[in-house]
């Protein structure tokens, strides 16, 4: 079972956290299942960028991006070459390290 190392984030994981999730799970689902309540305003339908993460290690192990995700990422705050929408990034067998950006383009936080 791969692990996801979450780098420290003021709101979601102040001291960082490491979680495990089965291969085939999206990073967003894994975070939510483990008490990391990352924003996901579109309910993981690949229609916004609120679940944007930067994959610091293990990027190549994730599934390929589809065109819809690539187009949406252009609007994400803090976009980097190794950015992914966590709802679309599917874990394989390799461990990953992610950073949740400090901000999103969401003006009103959803209560999920």
Image: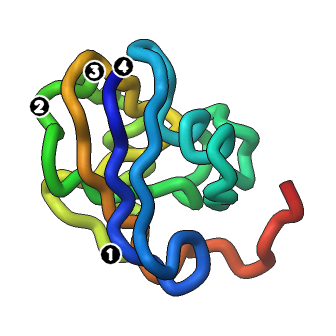
Report x, y in % for residue 19: 46, 43
Depth order, front residue of 39/37: 37
Indicate which disc residue 60 carries. Answer: 2
If you read the primary sequence from the N terminus, does the residue marked by circle 4 or circle 2 appear first?
A: 4
Cα distance between the residues tagged 1 and 2: 20 Å
**10 Å neighbourhood of mark 1: few (<14), some, or many (≥20)?**
some
Report x, y in % for residue 41: 73, 54
Cα distance between the residues tagged 3 and 1: 21 Å
Cα distance between the residues tagged 4 and 3: 16 Å
Q: Are marks 4 and 3 in contact (CB under 8 Å)?
A: no
Q: Which residue is mark 3?
A: 63
**Residue 68 located left or right of residue 2:** right
Q: Which residue is mark 4?
A: 1
**Which residue sits at x=32%, y=75%?**
78
**How many numbered circles are shown?**
4
User: Mark 4 against mark 2, which lies toward the viewer?
Assistant: 4
Q: Which residue is mark 1?
A: 78
Cα distance between the residues tagged 3 and 2: 8 Å
**Residue 103 located left or right of residue 42:** left
């Amino acid at each position: 079972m791969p692990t996801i190392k979450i780098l420290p984030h003021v709101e979601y994981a102040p001291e960082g956290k490491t979680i495990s999730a089965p291969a085939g799970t999206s990073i967003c689902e894994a975070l939510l299942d483990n008490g990391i309540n990352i924003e996901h305003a579109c309910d993981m339908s690949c229609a916004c960028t609120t679940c944007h993460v930067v994959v610091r290690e293990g990027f190549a192990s994730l599934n390929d991006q589809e065109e819809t995700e690539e187009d949406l990422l252009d609007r994400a705050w803090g976009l980097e070459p190794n950015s992914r929408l966590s709802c679309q990034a599917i874990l394989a067998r390799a461990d990953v390290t992610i950073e949740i950006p400090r901000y999103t383009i969401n003006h009103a936080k959803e209560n999920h």
